[in-house]
Image: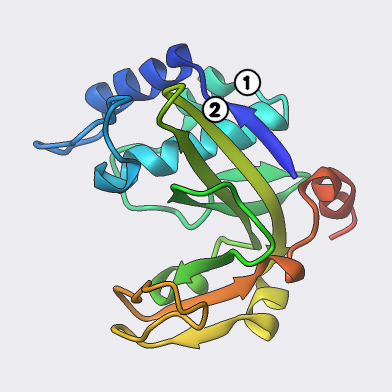
Amino acid sequence: MARAYLSPKIQQFVKNYIQKNIPYDELKLWASHEKLSKVNPTYIGLLGEIAVMALLKQNIKKNFKEKPVKRADDGFDVVIHNVNYDIKTMTSDYLPNNKFRYNVPHKHVCKENNDGFIFVTLYQDFEKKDLTAFVPGFISQNEFMKKATFHRRGEQSTLKNGFVYRCDTWDISRSHLIDFSKIKEISKNM
């Protein structure tokens, strides 16, 4: 599983970018003593995007300068060999494992400009105050729709871990994802 350490410098870059470009009045940004689950989803998503760009060795500052910040999500976050991927980032108090399920809200599943999904898990180590992004894999939108399971808002997770879906959601097990290390090769042939 690919992994990217999100240094304090990267975290500060994201905070500065959000404060300058995102039109939110009360955007709660992360401080190392807080649980990530209490933070604005935009901040979490941007950290996931930066982790993927870093692993792909893309120019993060250039990508963010070109990113359309003041309009609705275009459906994708990164382009690899002309394939558009939507990066979906979740937070966890646990290191990712094979039981993890990765989800996409129903309203995000069939966006026109999206060819697939890359999944990221942000793990917070409270003792070290570290933030690490794990990227277990990716999947094309077509394969996602064939293999994912639909859950209604309010439904309990099949993992029996107390998780309740906050909106209509599609989820997929990690076993259906393609290892992130193969994304450039596979995207080239899509």
Residue 111 seen:
no
Is 121 placed left or right of 138 in the picture?
left
Say whether residue 74 is visible: yes
Residue on which the image places disc 1: 59
* Few, some or many residues within 10 Å of mark 2 (<14, 14–19, 20+): some
Q: Residue 178: give x, y in percent of width and height.
A: 79, 60
Alpha carbon of mark 1 to alpha carbon of mark 2: how far? 6 Å
Pointer 1 and pointer 2: residues touching (CB < 8 Å)?
yes
What kind of element bears circle 2?
helix
Write the residue at 29% across / 28% down: 18
Q: In which quarter of the image is residue 124?
A: top left
Determine whether 88 is above or below 12 in the image: below
Residue ID at (90%, 47%): 185
Viewed as shown, does residue 69 lie left or right of 97?
A: left
Q: Residue at x 78, y 44 (%)?
A: 81
Residue carrying label 2? 63
